[in-house]
Amino acid sequence: MRPARRPREPPVSSLAVTDALLCGAAFWVASRPALPLLLRASAMAFAAAALFGVLRFTGLHTHPFPHQWLTLIVGTAAFPALAFAVARPDSRVTGEPLPALALLCVLGVVGVLVVRGLGIRPYMDACAVLSVVAVFLAARQRSDRIAGAGALAMLVGLMCFAAKFPGNGPLAPGDLLHLGLATGWVLIARSRL
């Protein structure tokens, strides 16, 4: 009698791989003490959302709530905090723990109330896109091409995700979002902040 075949494990989702790359890039940024505190806190929020994405897309934690909740916080609080940190790197809010935490908390609460409470999902999308545009404009004003390229990478990822591009193929729209965000974080962290 032949031994029973073990069921084949499903292949790891490409979303898990690209979320892992985003998690690593964001955690790397968050661990760099030379960067402004608010920027690092924003990166840590991205890393946390990406970590739960990895757990979700590998099947290790199948409930979507933590990933969705942290994505909401990233969209409504971490993106605007990133924009503020790039635009005003010498600000008290950017460099001191209490004001930085207060800004993130206020932005997060407002985001939850607007998106979950009022059901206005486009608010999160607008926060993300406008924040990345603000990063690009701040970088351009300082003639910081590296940060500008990082903002453009993030914007391309956001636009691909919104347009559901590519429709078919080995990569999902979320993959391009993750790759654009990871690239953007690395470039912004290496810029002249």
Image (spheres, helix red, strand yellow):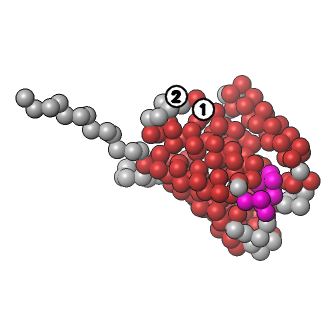
Residue 154, percent from left and from top:
62, 57
- Image: magenta residue range: 32-39
Residue 4 showing in the rendered view: yes
Residue 80, percent from left and from top:
76, 48
In this picture, residue 59 sits left or right of residue 136: left
State the image quarter where residue 115 is shown.
Answer: top right
Identity of the residue drawn at 80% across and 70% down = 141
The quarter in which the N terminus is drawn is top left
Residue 131, percent from left and from top:
73, 52
Report the predominant secondary structure element of the magenta stretch. loop
Residue 113, percent from left and from top:
75, 29
Is 149 rendered above or below residue 107? Answer: below
In this picture, residue 155 sits left or right of residue 80: left
Mark 1, residues whose alpha carbon is within 10 Å: few (<14), some, or many (≥20)?
some
Identity of the residue drawn at 54% across and 31% down = 64
* Along the viewing direction, whichever of 77 and 132 lies nearer the viewer: 77
Identity of the residue drawn at 67% across and 61% down = 151
Q: Residue furthest top?
A: 117
How far separated are the C-alphas under marks 2 and 1?
Answer: 7 Å
Count every numbered label the image shows and give the total. Answer: 2
C-beta proximity under 8 Å, tags 2 and 1: yes
Q: Amino acid at mark 2?
A: His
Query: Residue under circle 1?
Result: 66
Query: Residue under circle 2?
Result: 63
Circle 1: element type? helix
Q: Residue furthest left?
A: 1
Circle 2: element type? loop
In this picture, residue 58 sits left or right of residue 111: left
Residue 126 showing in the rendered view: no
Q: Amino acid at mark 1?
A: Pro
The quarter in which the C terminus is drawn is bottom right
Is 21 rendered above or below residue 59? Answer: below
